[in-house]
C-alpha cells in the first residue's frame, strides 16, 4: 500500500511541476460531476461497482477549489466527503485534477476500512469541451491513515462526466 501511495504522490508532484509551465488562464465554471467506478480494482477483495456525484465549485483560494459529494457502492457502502482540488490545464482541452477529501465512510455489507473517517486522494485526467463539460478517467485511493488498525485502504478506477453549472 505504501508503494502505491508513494507512486501516487510522486505522480501528482511531477504533474504539478510539468503543468505549471503550460497552465493557461481558463475561466472554468462550477461543475456537477458523475462517476462510475470499479471499487477495490487492484486487490479485488470485496469488489463492487461505485457511483459518485460531486459538486465542484468554480471559486476558491488561489488555485485550490472546494468540492464535495457522495459515493455509494453496490454492496451498500457509502462515503460522504468534502475537500479541495486543483485544475491544471494543458492547452484549452486537457485537464489534470488532483484532489483530496476527508469524509465519513459506511461499509454496508462491503469492504471494511476499520474507521468511519477516511481520506480520499485522487487524480483525474479529462478532456474539456468548449462549453466547459468534461469527460475523463481517474485513479483514487481511500484510507483511514492508520487511525483504525488495520488500514486496508481501497483503490478505485473511475470514468467521469462533468456538466457545467453557470
Image (cartoon, rainbow, N blue to C red):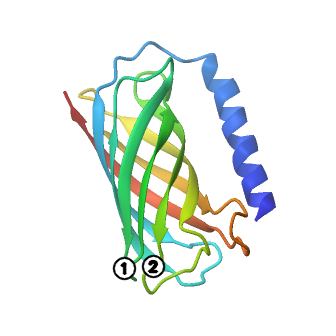
* Marks 2 and 1 in Cβ contact (< 8 Å): yes
Residue drawn at the location 47% of the way across and 33% of the way down: 95
| 20 versus 151 height, above or below | above
Residue 43 shown left or right of residue 80 in the figure: right
Residue drawn at the location 59% of the way across and 61% of the way down: 142
Residue identifier under label 1: 74
Q: Residue 48 carries which label?
A: 2
Please provide percent x and percent y for residue 22.
Answer: 57, 17
Quadrant showing the C terminus: top left
Please provide percent x and percent y for residue 114.
Answer: 62, 75
Answer whether residue 96 is visible to the viewer in this image: no
| 96 versus 149 height, above or below | above
Dot 1 alpha-carbon crowd within 10 angstroms: few under 14, some 14 to 19, many 20 or more: some
In the depicted view, which residue is nearer to us: 142 or 156? 142
Residue drawn at the location 45% of the way across and 79% of the way down: 48
In the depicted view, which residue is nearer to us: 123 or 102? 102
User: What SS does tag 1 mark?
Assistant: loop
Amino acid at each position: 500500500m505504501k508503494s502505491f501511495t508513494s507512486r501516487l504522490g510522486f505522480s501528482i508532484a511531477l504533474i504539478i511541476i510539468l503543468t505549471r509551465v503550460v497552465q493557461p488562464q481558463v475561466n472554468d465554471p462550477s461543475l456537477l460531476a458523475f462517476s462510475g467506478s470499479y471499487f477495490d480494482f487492484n486487490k479485488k477483495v470485496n469488489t463492487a461497482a461505485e457511483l459518485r456525484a460531486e459538486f465542484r465549485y468554480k471559486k476558491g483560494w488561489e488555485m485550490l477549489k472546494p468540492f464535495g459529494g457522495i459515493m455509494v457502492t453496490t454492496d451498500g457502502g457509502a462515503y460522504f466527503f468534502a475537500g479541495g482540488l486543483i485544475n491544471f490545464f494543458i492547452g484549452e482541452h486537457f485537464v489534470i485534477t488532483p484532489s483530496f477529501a476527508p469524509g465519513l465512510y459506511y461499509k454496508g455489507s462491503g469492504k471494511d476500512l476499520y474507521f468511519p473517517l477516511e481520506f480520499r486522494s485522487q487524480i483525474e485526467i479529462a478532456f474539456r469541451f468548449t462549453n466547459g463539460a468534461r469527460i475523463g478517467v481517474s485513479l483514487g485511493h481511500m484510507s483511514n491513515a492508520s487511525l483504525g488498525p488495520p488500514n486496508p485502504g481501497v483503490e478505485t478506477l473511475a470514468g467521469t462526466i462533468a456538466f457545467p453549472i453557470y
